[in-house]
Image (cartoon, rainbow, N blue to C red):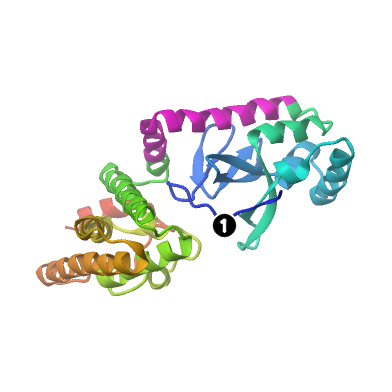
Amino acid sequence: MIIKSKLFVRKYLNKGFLIDKMGKESEKGLIVFQGKTIRRTWFNDEWWFSIVDIVGVLTESDRARKYWSDLKTRLVEEGFELSAKIGQLKLASADGKLYLTDCVNTKNAFRIIQSIPSKKAEPFKQWLAQVGYERVEEIQNPELAQKRMKELYKAKGYSDDWVEKRVRGIAIRDELTDEWKMRGVSEERDFAILTAEISKATFGITPSEYKKFKGLKRENLRDHMNDLELIFTMLGERVSTEITRKEDAQGYSQVEVAAKRGGRVAGNARRDTEKELGRPIASSENYLAEPEKKKKKQIEEKK
């Protein structure tokens, strides 16, 4: 049975991280082995890897798809039950669009690697096992995941206080979505609509409009918010969680009402703050060209 999956968005940023052989990380749902990228996604509580990318790394072929097509035929002839072990999961392609892609978990990746003659097979197996082990560590000790995430943001040029807010914002967001799930809202599409309602009530614009305002494309919006933007985002989502619990909202319609009310609370607080500061909270600035830490230092020097 081929597994049909919706794009599975996991806790940090979708998120997967880039981890190269030097241990460096960055977000993109990719990992790197000896300079070669391998797409992956978190599905059914484990990592699933793009088979074509694995084949490309091991064979160093520019026709990895053809190689995989031929290998599939051979594996079936050898009795390997591909249909039960391969999942078609949505991964981003070079054009930025999501396509259903043949993927395998770590266990079945080892079986495919064994079928590919390559001097890189053994080091790749060791590397793959390490990637899986790190995730198991994070599940057993969530503090490790937080620590790695903080290190990632700091390496990308964010200040300590910004990182603390961002990490806290992720926890608040996770608590809100967990609450939605317990109350009968589980579709990613519904999550997106509810998030848009909170954002519109808080800032007057939806997340997609906010991204355009900041000149972003595929980047994560919250990674380009300043301190106050993060704070009001957290306020809207936290109050939405509290109202949802207080009213014991059940089903999408009631949860939506709670989300709008939570956003309005944050929106009123934002407008009061703007009156006091004499400027809007929502900013068109992003951190594409200049890291947050550097921008913050420049602002402080001007004061």
Measured from the top left, where is residue 11 in percent x and y? 43, 46
Measured from the top left, where is residue 225 in percent x and y? 33, 59
Q: Disc count in the image?
A: 1
Label 1, secondary structure: give it.
loop
Q: Is residue 137 magenta?
A: yes
Q: Residue at x 75, y 46 (%)?
A: 83
Out of 158 and 30, give the one closest to the viewer.
30
Q: Residue at x 25, y 65 (%)?
A: 258
Q: Crowdedness of circle 1 by 10 Å Cα count: few (<14), some, many (20+)?
A: few
Answer whether residue 83 is visible to the viewer in this image.
yes
Secondary structure character of the magenta stretch overall? helix
Question: Over which residues does the magenta segment extend?
Answer: 122-151
Q: Amino acid at mark 1?
A: Lys
Q: Is residue 186 magenta?
A: no
Q: Residue at x 75, y 32 (%)?
A: 111
Q: Does 55 appear above or below 91? A: above
Q: Does 124 appear above or below 242? A: above
Measured from the top left, where is residue 107 in percent x and y? 66, 32
> Does 303 sit left or right of 164 as displayed?
left
Out of 160 and 84, give the one closest to the viewer.
84
Disc 1 target residue: 6
Q: Quadrant of residue 239?
A: bottom left
